[in-house]
Image: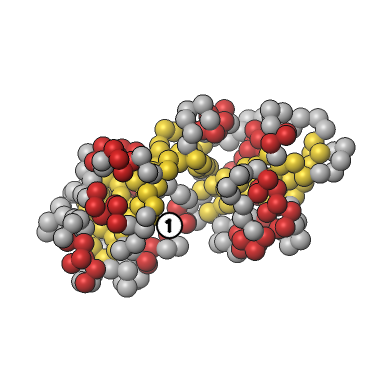
Amino acid sequence: MPVLDPSDGERKAIRSRSFYAQSSPRCSGTVLDVTDPADSTDHGFRDALLDVYLENPSRTLSTAFWKFGSRLDEFRTVVETDDVRVTRLSAWNEDELQVHWTRDRDRFPFSPAFVAESNLAVVHDDYLRHLPERMVGTAEPFFRMERRRRPHSSPNLPSGYRFQDVDVERETDELSELISRCYDDLGPDSETVAQWTEHPVFEEDLWVWIVERETGDYVGAGVAELDAGIREASLEWIQVLPRYHGEGLGRALVRELLRRVGGRVAFTTVSGRYDGDKGLKAFYERCGFQGDDIWWVFRD
């Protein structure tokens, strides 16, 4: 069976047809397993994606595994294998390109037109050479990194500060406000923050404040999530108010969350806006995270 290429003229054909999995959820040889979003009972793509993700999380997905996994039934999916292992994974619908991974990084079957016409397309840095430079200039880059070793020392919070658990039932307003004060263009409202507690990976002990002892003010906050099923933790929000930058609070906050995660996970991931190798990415490198994976987000 030829590789399904949702590009140019074929894009309309894909929208008008339904592709269903073959009897075996995994294919052999060069056969593809192609599923329609309506076929929510097939687990072949999810299992194949998880196998690859655990090999290299940051190169496989732009976000924590659970975030895409919870939306899997919204996408058409392709699995391609050789006789031994998975060689291609793709997931898309008429609005989004969310997953494209190939073992051979030279392969990118989606056309520039398909990427441009999608409301949202997430493309790994390895595949950018297949897209026109003018398109790349409109995309926003994000780094993704991971850490697999546990911290060997205490968080070393500077004197004058202490950690305190966030009261997740009463302090969503305060957390929303602190995050908003750390950005010019980003700020989840209190309702959105409260919704985070409904995530299947929510862990109350992974929400923490940094408190200034003298004033009792909240000057920093950290939120992490934990997927016990695959033993992944993800750092979601690491915020320190700008006037307190340079005191080592951010690094102490990261190390405190890693300490709290402890032996419950095999690895911890983090992502953020990429503003060069000396920006936020460098901060996480100093915290022990590794990786050079950059993901580009194209929005219509």
Location of residue 41 with respect to 83 vertically, above or below: below
Q: Residue at x 20, y 71 (%)?
A: 17
* Residue 151 spot, x, y in % from top left: 61, 33
Residue corresponding to mark 1: 68
Foreground residue among 279 and 186: 186
Q: Residue at x 16, y 55 (%)?
A: 3
Q: Looking at the rendering, which quadrant does residue 137 occupy?
A: top left
* Residue 49 spot, x, y in % from top left: 35, 53
Which amino acid is tagged 1?
A: Phe
| Relative horizontal placement of residue 157, taking residue 10 as reference (left or right) | right
Mark 1 surroundings: few (<14), some (14-19) or many (≥20) residues within 10 A: some
Q: Can residue 22 be seen by looking at this rendering?
A: no
Foreground residue among 210 and 266: 210
Q: Can residue 201 be seen by looking at this rendering?
A: yes
Location of residue 258 with respect to 78 vertically, above or below: above
Location of residue 146 with respect to 96 vertically, above or below: above
Quadrant location of the C terminus? bottom left
Q: Secondary structure at mark 1?
A: helix
Q: Residue at x 57, y 61 (%)?
A: 199
| Relative horizontal placement of residue 71, taking residue 189 as reference (left or right) | left
